[in-house]
Amino acid sequence: MSSKPTIALAPGDGIGPEIMQATLDLFREAKVHDHVDFVNVEMGKSVFDKGDSRGMTDIAIRTTEDCGILFKGPMETPKGGGGKSINVTLRKMFNAYANFRHFKTLPGVTTVYSKAGINLDMTIVRENIEDTYGGVEHRLSNDMIQCKRLISAPGCDQVHRYAFQTARKMGVKKVHCGHKANIMKMTDGLFLERFKRTAQDFPEIETGDVIVDALCMNLVVKPQQYQMIVLPNLQGDIVSDLCAGLVGGLGFAPSANIGRHISIFEAVHGTAPDIAGKGIANPTSLILSGIMMLRHVGLLKHAAIIENALLAALESGVHTGDFGDPAMKNYKPAVGTKDFTQAIINKLGTKPETVAAVPVPEQGAWAIEKHARPASQQVIRTFTNVITHVVGCDIYLDTPLAPASVAEEMQRCCADTPFNITLISNRGTQVWPTGSVYTECVDYYRVRFELKKDIPVGTIGQSRAVALMDKIAEKFTVCSFELLRTFDGIKGYSLAQGQ
Ligand code: NAP
């Protein structure tokens, strides 16, 4: 049996097997296989087709856990039927909490910026597990659907620490936090606050924060002002693709999903079913992801040699059909995946001439530590010993009544309880006791109940709030319920718009 470390390998669907083969051919020629074995795991369409809605077999899960590294091609998400994206499932299941993408101007890849002589080199670190990507969604009334946005302090801390540690390793001087904390004061507010907290441990790195809409405009107008940006999941997903566009498209954007125990490396683009099997797919994104993987596992010398060969090949004008600029001096007709890969193989050991070559370091040791397999899932916590008190509840109703009628009914329900009704909102905007008659309402209300003035905080527990909900549920459809609590005396809930 081989004593080499192993990497789990899932070629993927559509163009996946073609670009994975190209990448492995290049790696073999660069002698990567002298240091590591690749072991195939069954994931993607073939598993979905067998009726397993996870898209991966038990053996594939166990092999990936044992290897600690998964190198994967793009995988098809079955359309409809409630099937979840296997790509998102993998990241969440293995707690790959940080998505790292590096966007660099590449020779031979023409963009508006390269034409203007602007060289881009920036990274996006995106929180990878939480936010709306939990996919926790419910239909609450005839007309209202909700998606829960979950942001946790440990989740923020993990991604911010990874970002700053990576910035330190890469020599990045300034890290920005992208967010929307001006609107989502609690969720994005926590993300930003934990960013600032983590930054204190990295005093040599300058920090800034930027609201995500302004960030998008800045990235288009002057992208070179950013070196590294860390963002929550959904915003990070959108901004990453924007950045891919700045350097030539998804075909040039590598992606690493980093976790404490398991990390996943993949191309950013999908399975491109329209060109699958034609031998014309561009393997650059997967090759770049593979280079990131080699660096991650400590094969620094191999990573640099392969990257220099890729840069030298691109610089020579070789390209697949999805890129290449006829206006370039050394323009050549497009080639297929195999010839493109062979052109990179031919450049192994050489360096690019028109762009800076990557320094080739001494070979490092295998960098992946083997941890003992945990006996069960870990509970990770940031804040402990916090004193919490119940101060009320928000009860959400499915009703077509107008706000004043809802208020009348609710006042009757809470008359003999420790709670007063303090506000009613619709789609987050206060509609009672004050508001505008021009606020249009839908069939889903939040009714806020807070402790009556003469009831001291700390004397009432959650059971009284649940009893109030029970009472209301006798007459109304209660869609959901949230306790209002203070945490060390600070309100753990937001105000309504217009309150
Ligand atoms: P896509 O597969 O990225 O393809 C969009 C188009 O981009 C293709 O039709 C092709 O355009 C071009 N393209 C993408 N990668 C290319 C490459 N390597 N070489 C040359 N051209 C390339 O996006 P999609 O059509 O939205 O998604 C298709 C499937 O992929 C879906 O099932 C989706 O769920 C899945 N997906 C998987 C991942 C992943 O595994 N990480 C990510 C995204 C999507 P032309 O028309 O120019 O040929």
Image (tube, rainbow, N blue to C red):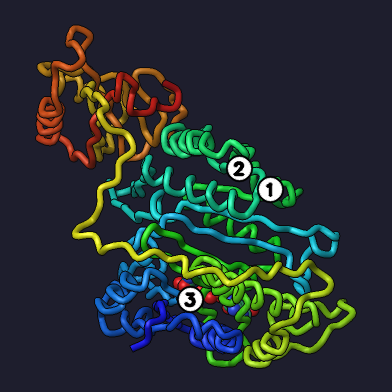
Height in image: 272 above or below 94? below
Residue under pointer 1: 226
| Nearest-to-viewer mark from 3 and 2 | 2
Q: Is mark 3 within 8 Å of ligand 1?
A: yes
Q: Residue flagged by tag 3: what amino acid is it? A: Pro
Kindly identify the amino acid type of the residue bearing the numbered disc 2. Answer: His
187 sits left or right of 343 in the view? left
Residue drawn at x 36%, y 61% as measured from the top left? 261
Task: Please determine whether, in this image, residue 134 is positioned above or below residue 41.
Answer: above
Q: Which mark is residue 176?
A: 2
Toward which corner of the image does residue 119 lie, by quadrant? bottom right
| CA distance for labels 2 and 1 | 8 Å
Q: Amino acid at mark 1?
A: Tyr
Mark yes or no: residue 184 visible: no
Give the side of residue 428 with respect to residue 325, left or right. Answer: left
* Residue found 84% across the figure and 80% down from its top: 326
Residue at numbered disc 3: 74
Mark toward the start of the polypeptide (2 vs 1)? 2
Circle 1 SS class: loop
